[in-house]
Amino acid sequence: MTVKLFDSELKVMEVLWKEGDMTAGRLAKVMNEQIGWNRNTTYTVIKKLIDKNAIERKEPGFSCRALISKDQIQQQEAATLIDKLFDGSAELFLSAYLSGKALSESEIERLKRLVENLS
C-alpha cells in the first residue's frame, strides 16, 4: 500500500510512532506544545490521515492508532526519491549521497554488511 504523506501529516505520524496510541485531544495538545498548532489544525490533519488509512480512529475517546509504520514510509519515500531523481538506480543514489562525505570505519563496515546481506 502506497501512502503519500505531506510534512504536516508526517509530524502527526512522528508523534504516534514515538508515543503510541493516543486520543485526538492528547495529540492536539502535543502538537500545540511542539509546533504551536491549534486544535482545529491537528483535527484536520488527523482526518486526512484517517482518509488515507494511515491512522485509525477508535472509540471510545477518539483514540488514534498508526496503521503504517515509520519503516514503511521511509522505504516508500526512499524508493520514490530514487525513482524520481536517479532513474531507479540505488547505486547512483548512494554515489551521489556519499560523494564528499567522510564516513567512519564503523559506518563503512555497517554499509558493507548491508550490501553483503542483500545477496
Image (spheres, helix red, strand yellow):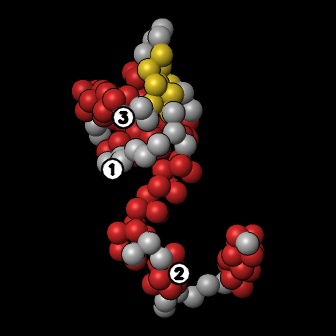
Image point (51%, 33%), residue name: 67
Give the label, 1 or 2, closer to the camera: 2
Tell me the kind of residue under disc 3: Lys
Q: Which residue is mark 3?
A: 52
Instruction: Locate the C terminus by quadrant.
Output: bottom right
Q: Which residue is mark 2?
A: 91
The residue tagged with tag 1: helix, strand or loop?
helix
Image point (57%, 88%), residue name: 102
User: Does the rendering let one see residue 38?
Assistant: no
Image point (72%, 79%), residue name: 112
Give the label, 1 or 3, closer to the camera: 3
Q: Residues within 10 Å of mark 1 (few under 14, many from 20)?
A: few
Camera-nearest residue between 37 and 71: 71
Q: Position of residue 84 (x, y in %)?
A: 35, 69
Q: Which residue is mark 1?
A: 7
Q: Position of residue 78 (x, y in %)?
A: 47, 63
Q: Residues within 10 Å of mark 3 (few under 14, many from 20)?
A: some
* On screen, residue 71 above or below 56: below
* On screen, residue 80 above or below 17: below
Q: CA distance from mark 1 to mark 3?
A: 14 Å
Q: Quadrant of residue 55?
A: top left
The residue tagged with tag 3: helix, strand or loop?
loop
- Count of picture labels: 3
